[in-house]
Image (spheres, helix red, strand yellow):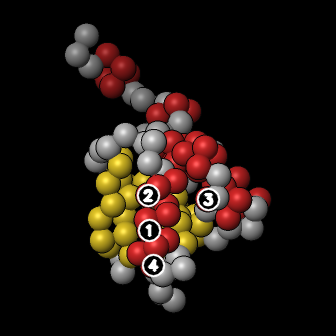
C-alpha cells in the first residue's frame, strides 16, 4: 500500500473523531484531535500515544514503540495491531484512549513526597 493510500485509510477509519487533523512530520504524518497530538503515521504503520495504563495492551500484543530511525525512540507511541487498525470502531476506541488522559494519571502527585503545610494552606 502506498504511503498516501495508507494515510487515507487511517483517516477514513478515524473519520468519526471530531476535529481530526493530519499534518506532515517525522517523514510521515502526525494526527491531532483539536490541539492534542495523539498519533503518528510512518512508513505504512500507525502509532498511537500510550500511557502507563494503556501501554500494556500494546506490549501484550507484541507491538513496539515508534523508532523513526536507529537512534531515536519515542517510547510513548506504540504501533497499533492490524486487527485493531482494520476495525474502525475498535480503532476509534483506542484513539480516544490516546487522546484522553486517564483520570488516575491526572490525580498523580507531582512529587514523591507529600506537599508541605505551606502548599496545603497557600491561598486560604
- Pointers 4 and 1 in contact (CB under 8 A)? yes
Instruction: Give the SS element for disc 2.
Output: helix
Q: Residue furthest bottom?
A: 70
Mark 1 to mark 3 CA distance (whole Å): 12 Å
Residue 7 marker: 1
Q: Looking at the picture, does residue 73 appear above or below residue 123?
A: below
**Do residues under tags 1 and 3 come within 8 Å of each other at their CB atoms?**
no
Q: Earlier in the sequence, mark 1 or mark 3?
A: 1
Residue at screen point 37% across, 64% down = 30
Q: Which residue is mark 2?
A: 11
Residue 85: which numbered mark, if any?
A: 3
**Image quadrant where one finds the C terminus:** top left
Quick check: 12 left or right of 29? right
Q: CA distance from mark 4 to mark 1?
A: 6 Å
Q: CA distance from mark 2 to mark 4?
A: 12 Å
Q: CA distance from mark 4 to mark 3?
A: 15 Å
How busy is the neighbourhood of tag 4: few (under 14 within 10 Å), some, or many (20 plus)? some
Which residue is at a point 55% across and 72% down the rendered structure image?
Answer: 45
Which callout, 4 or 3, points at the residue further toward the start of the chain? 4
Residue 1 figure quarter? bottom right
Indicate the secondary structure of the residue bearing disc 3: helix
Q: CA distance from mark 3 to mark 2?
A: 11 Å
Secondary element at image label 1: helix
Q: Which residue is mark 4?
A: 3
The reply to whether callout 1 and callout 2 are in contact (CB within 8 Å) is: yes
Rounded to the nearest angstrom, the CA distance separating label 1 from label 2 is 6 Å
Amino acid at each position: 500500500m502506498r504511503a498516501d493510500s495508507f494515510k487515507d485509510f487511517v483517516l477514513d477509519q478515524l473519520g468519526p473523531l471530531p476535529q481530526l487533523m493530519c499534518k506532515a512530520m517525522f517523514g510521515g504524518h502526525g494526527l491531532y484531535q483539536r490541539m492534542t497530538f495523539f498519533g503518528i503515521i510512518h512508513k505504512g504503520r500507525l502509532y498511537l500515544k500510550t500511557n502507563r495504563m494503556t501501554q500494556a495492551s500494546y506490549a501484550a500484543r507484541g507491538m513496539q514503540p515508534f523508532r523513526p530511525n536507529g537512534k531515536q525512540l519515542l517510547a510513548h507511541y506504540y504501533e497499533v495491531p492490524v486487527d485493531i487498525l482494520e476495525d474502525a470502531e475498535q480503532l476509534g476506541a483506542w484513539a480516544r484512549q490516546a487522546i484522553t488522559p486517564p483520570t488516575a494519571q491526572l490525580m498523580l502527585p507531582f512529587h514523591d513526597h507529600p506537599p508541605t503545610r505551606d502548599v496545603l494552606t497557600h491561598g486560604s
